Amino acid sequence: MTLLDIPADSGFGLANLPYGVYSVAGGPRRCATRVGDVVVDLAVLLGDDDFAAGTLETFMAAGPRRWAQVREAIRAAVRADVPDAALHPVGEVTMHLPCEIADYVDFYASEHHASNLGRLFRPDNPDPLLPNWKHLPVGYHGRSSTIVVSGVDVVRPCGQRKGPNDPEPVFGPSVRLDIEAELGFLVGVGNDMGSSIGTGAADEHLFGAVIFNDWSARDIQAWEYVPLGPNLGKSFASSISPWVVPMAALEAARVPTPTQEPTPLPYLRMDEPWGLDIDLSVRWNGHEVSRPPYREMYWSPAQMLAHTTVNGARTRTGDIFASGTISGPGADQRGAFIELTWGGKEPVDVGGQERTFLLDGDTVTITATALGAGGERVSFGEVTASILPARC
Ligand code: CA
């Protein structure tokens, strides 16, 4: 038995207690939480069969009362003697997706990002926001089957592109490969087809959050996206961080969203729409190039979930919806390279090298922390991946 050291300044103290799925040395997948730099097996720690399988789905589907009970049980158990068989140094495990990803919707909830992209993609339009943007959280349906966990490298996609001066479209590897630093929210309890989830009921359904990197091939996207939105420019890969931070661990990080004016329609209205005070950091080949602030996001996660289901669409355990690129007002707060480099015209310094878009071999790592209970920081860990050469 071991009495765990629980460092409050690690980001993985008692205010966090995230959930993940790990394996050791090619063994079976198992559910865990993380305390400091130790991965703690939940089936061994709690003797709870819901954690014996290599996925969190059963627990995620059980709902908020059970989530709260288990969180208290973990909190008590990790402060007592822990069986040695439950403990693994974080460096000795392989992390996996926390669950099978069901459906995936990606939103566009940052006014700063949407405005910057409007200026870049529609430079002749006097209003960078389209007329619907402040009336509904704009989103598109993405590809869940290519959502991968941190550490899985990304092959440069191939596709059609047609630059403004190209007479005809051409096919080949993307030459404007980009990132989008986002948060992803995982649904625990879904809703039946024909029903909807009101803005006040998000806590009954949302299980937790991860960091989400929505890899984006800007050249493929720019040519294909009119009039139906992104498709192959996005669907080749999205990466998530492996530790799911429970929504309960993010209660201390709740802050009001920016003022929503005009007032949204009743199904999106909230007395006090809440956002989250979460600081992200984007590192390109180890050099920090941006610090996107989640608190700047215009639409609340509760509003995005309400909008997703207001037409009677079903959600399921393992559904994920991503926030859209997180960009703040500052030039060093932009969560995509197309914004940071202003369409590739203003290269950024990456350790003495100039970069606009991603080169083969480049590595992007996104980290995030939130304010937790008692003033502790709550860490999301990281999502990282490197770019492999195209295969076309
Ligand atoms: Ca996105």
Image (spheres, helix red, strand yellow):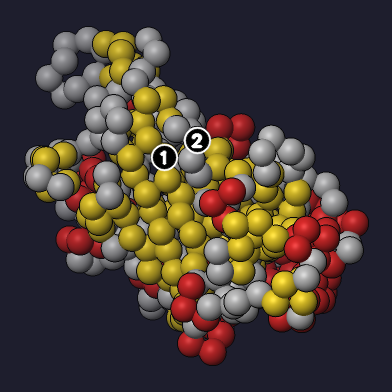
Q: In this view of the protein, can residue 101 be seen by the observer? A: no
Q: Position of residue 270 (x, y in %)?
A: 56, 77
Is 267 placed above or below 259 here? above
Is 167 placed above or below 355 here? above
The type of residue carrying mark 1 is: Ala
The type of residue carrying mark 2 is: Val
Tell which of 384 and 200 is nearer to you. 384
Identified at 49% across, 59% down, the residue is 381
Are circles 1 and 2 on residues that touch, CB within 8 Å?
Answer: yes
With 345 as the anchor, is 45 left or right in this view? right
With 230 as the anchor, is 184 left or right in this view? right
Identified at 48% across, 40% down, the residue is 151
Label 2, ligand 1: CB separation under 8 Å: no
Badge 1 is on which residue?
385
Q: Position of residue 193 (x, y in %)?
A: 79, 48
Label 1, ligand 1: CB separation under 8 Å: no
Badge 2 is on which residue?
152
Is 56 placed above or below 373 here? above
**Number of residues whose C-alpha sits closer than 10 Å to that of mark 1, classed few (under 14), some (14–19) or many (20 or more):** many
